[in-house]
Image (spheres, grey):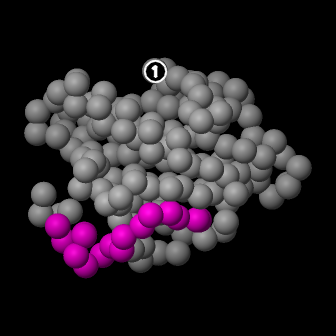
């Protein structure tokens, strides 16, 4: 992948642990992960590793009412209307809404995850391209991302 080589040399920095600029969440990364520099202040924060096939992006939103309590169950009903295959599961004691899309025309798979706590909601996506669709590879990448998200905590 030419793009990843360029990213790793010019537009990224190694990352072991990352705390969001607003101090809303923290994620610990295994060795080899890099944070991609962002040119815009409010864009999603992106990470990649040569051990993984794709890019992880995380966006955070927060409700202005500090007493607001995020509910994955309420969010799930809304998401399910747009993404019928969405599931509600638990990763490291956090309720997570997840789904996958496969754009065969573009040879891209996107895993999407929504999780929240108190007045904070995170939207994470993991996107990767493939040359030939392979269900074993898809399941392997999804398992890797789930393991990575286990290391995400709200601050």
Q: 139 or 67: which is nearer to us?
A: 139
| Direction from residue 42 to residue 134 in the image, left or right | left
Total numbered labels: 1
Image quadrant for the C terminus?
A: bottom right
| Residue 65 horizontal side relative to residue 95, left or right | right
- Which quadrant does the N terminus fall into? bottom left
Residue 35 on the magenta span = no
Residue 51: x %, y % from top left: 25, 50
Q: Name the foreground residue: 133 vs 29.
A: 29
Q: In the rendered image, is residue 75 in sight? A: no
- 58 on left or right of 7: right
Q: In which quarter of the image is residue 49?
A: bottom left
Residue at the spot x=46%, y=21% of the render? 85
The one of 103 and 97 positioned closer to us in this rendering: 97
User: Considering only vertical position in the picture, is 68 above or below 16?
Assistant: above
Q: How crowded is mark 1: few (under 14 residues within 10 Å), some or many (20 or more)?
A: few
Magenta part of the protein: which range? 5-20
- Residue that sits furthest to the front in the current view: 31
Query: How far across and how far down the image is residue 15, in percent?
Result: 42, 67
Query: Which quarter of the figure has residue 42?
Result: bottom right
Question: Residue at left 88%, top 49%?
Answer: 67
Residue 101 location in percent, x, y?
A: 35, 32
Find residue 7 and report its image quarter.
bottom left
User: Can residue 14 be seen in the rendering of this structure?
Assistant: yes
Residue 136 appears at what percent x and percent y? 22, 25
Name the element at disc 1: loop
User: Is residue 26 positioned above or below 124 on the image?
Assistant: below
Q: Is residue 107 above or below residue 99?
A: below
In the drawing, does residue 155 fall left or right of residue 7? right
Q: Of residues 113 and 93, which is closer to you in this image?
A: 93
Can you identify the residue that label 1 sits on? 85
């Amino acid at each position: 992948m030419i793009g990843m080589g360029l990213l790793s040399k010019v537009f990224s920095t190694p990352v072991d642990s990352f705390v969001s600029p607003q101090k809303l969440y923290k994620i610990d990364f295994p060795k080899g992960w890099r944070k991609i520099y962002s040119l815009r202040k409010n864009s999603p924060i992106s990470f990649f590793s040569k051990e993984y096939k794709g890019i992880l992006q995380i966006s955070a939103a927060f409700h202005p009412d500090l007493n607001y309590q995020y509910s994955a169950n309420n969010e799930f009903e809304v998401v399910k209307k747009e993404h019928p295959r969405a599931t509600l599961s638990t990763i490291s004691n956090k309720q997570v809404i997840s789904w996958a899309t496969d754009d065969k025309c573009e040879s891209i798979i996107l895993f999407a995850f929504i999780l929240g706590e108190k007045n904070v909601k995170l939207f994470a996506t993991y996107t990767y391209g493939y040359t030939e669709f392979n269900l074993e590879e898809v399941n392997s990448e999804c398992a890797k991302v789930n393991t990575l998200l286990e290391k995400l905590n709200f601050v």
